[in-house]
Image (tube, rainbow, N blue to C red):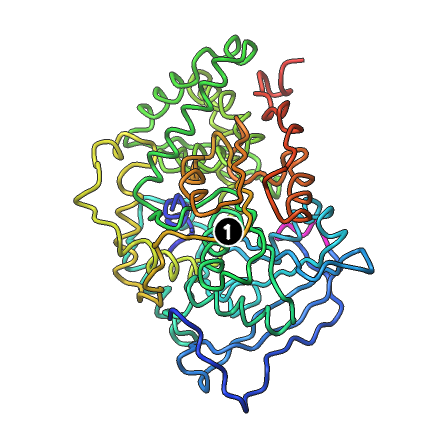
Amino acid sequence: MRKTSCLALLSVWLLNAPVADATEAAPSVAFAPCRLEGSAGLQAIAAECGSLSVPENYDAPQGLHIDLYVARVRAVSQRAAPDPLVVIAGGPGMASTDFYASVAAAFARIRRERDIVVVDQRGTGQSNLLDCEFDEQDLLDPEAIDIGALARDCRDRLVERADLTQYTTSVAMRDLETLRTALAYPQFNLYGVSYGTRVAQHYAKRYPGNARTLILDGVIAPSLVLGPNMALDAEAALQRIFARCLAAAACKGAYGDPTIDYRALWTTLDGKRVTVSLPDPTTGAERQLEFGRAHLSAVLRLASYDPSQAALLPLALKQAHRDNNYRALAAQFLLISRSLDSVFAYGMHNSVACSEDAPAIDLAALPRDQLTATHMGFKQVEQLVTMCREWPRGVVDEDFRAPLRSSAAALLLSGGDDPVTPPVYATEAQQAFTDSLHLILPGFGHGQLSAPCVDKIMADFVAAGSARQLDVRCTDKLLPTPFFTSPAGPAP
């Protein structure tokens, strides 16, 4: 699929392992010094890296093996706790090593006493990456696509070197347990964000005694089918952001109700595009972009992920609608597009989505009128189903959507304005745990690692191994980024 269709679809993330043959060599990882770098190349973390060889298909252990890229950042303490923290990225399709390098500071307190272990899930990063390359022009023309043909093209390129049925969450859990055995850790503490919360919960289901604690950030409940509700959730989050602007005197004074600009702009772009000339936000070179509804929808949804980006929306919408100046929105679209292009492995994303979510979607049963009334529309979920008709369905455990029951302690983190995993999903997931705390940060978006004092809360939680006595009062005064009232920034 093309990268832009992925913008829309992202607008979407063997019951028992066989006993190893007694003569088969135990898995191992040979580590060597390395440095982890984030996708932007701005961070570099000293670590030790190696590879773990696993069967691509666990039911054919003598067949093709793939190498999983593993990194470990040793604890600062010379008397480290025996159970490390495993960091699991979202997507599906993001490499966990890239993700960790970009957010390592949030785990610094935990690392004082525990190793940090990171593995690129099969199909991502340096673990047999499943991705397809596309012309950037495709990215800038999201409506002129044949999603089925693009999916077939991507599939046909990848099947020459990978069995696409073997890159699902259910198979990846066996990789994670193989890694725990290889590194001789008695248990894992798990941090997962977004799709990574699905991974962490499924690991706790498959290997209940081996998960000590779970930090679930932007939670997907096991029963949740991703896709049908995404457009509704994104629209609701956008309206909450606009309501915050109305409740803030400076923002209301500058813009009134941003919903008016949003609706008017949506009407203006009905069936047409606006030619925007702007300096490229990455290179500075002058360029043009034909900006239409699909571009606006991508900005509205993905800017809602981050309160610092959401703070710019009322200003950008006002400039486009009232001043006929689309440059701020166009620049945001280009930045968002390139960010996704550099981060996600779309082949792995498709293997997960087309095995775990799309088969459970009945288009005829969805509230078409309600979905059509959102900026993402009905086409978003329709494209997902169309794409997945061309993609092989992979291995999914029979009890994949069954409720989880876990004795592990859980800390669940939600943003009040999260456009993809609203707090209600964490509330449902919390029922699986007898020892848990669900922390909601009003006005925040998707993923809470950057919020002040969350790093301390996570470290206290992992150290205690329990959420029952966790002190979270430091979050009482947390506020999202204030809205920009001019290009110069927020009001004084």
Q: Quadrant of the rendered structure where residue 488 is?
A: top right
Q: Quadrant of the rendered structure where residue 272 is?
A: top left
Q: Residue 317, position in %: x, y?
A: 46, 23
The magenta stretch is 39-44
Front in this rendered view, residue 332 or 423 = 423
Front in this rendered view, residue 176 or 277 = 176
Residue at 53% x, 44% y: name it.
Answer: 435
Q: Residue 239, position in %: x, y?
A: 40, 24
Q: Residue furthest bottom?
A: 23
Q: Residue 486, position in %: x, y?
A: 59, 17
User: Mark 1, residues whose alpha carbon is within 10 Å: few (<14), some, or many (≥20)?
Assistant: many
34 relative to 394 in the view: left or right: right
Residue at 62% x, 18% y: name it.
Answer: 490
Q: Residue 342, position in %: x, y?
A: 54, 53
- Quadrant containing the N terminus is bottom left
- Quadrant containing the C terminus is top right
Residue at 28% x, 32% y: name it.
Answer: 271
Query: Disc 1 residue type?
Result: Gly
Front in this rendered view, residue 134 or 408 = 408
Q: Is residue 368 magenta?
A: no
Magenta stretch prevailing secondary structure? loop
Q: Which residue is mark 1?
A: 90
394 relative to 134 in the view: left or right: left
Q: What is the secondary structure assignment of the residue under circle 1?
A: loop
Residue 389 sits above or below residue 296 on the image? below
Residue 39 sits above or below residue 160 on the image? above
Front in this rendered view, residue 325 or 265 = 265
Residue 473 sits above or below residue 215 on the image? above
Residue 122 sits above or below residue 65 on the image? above
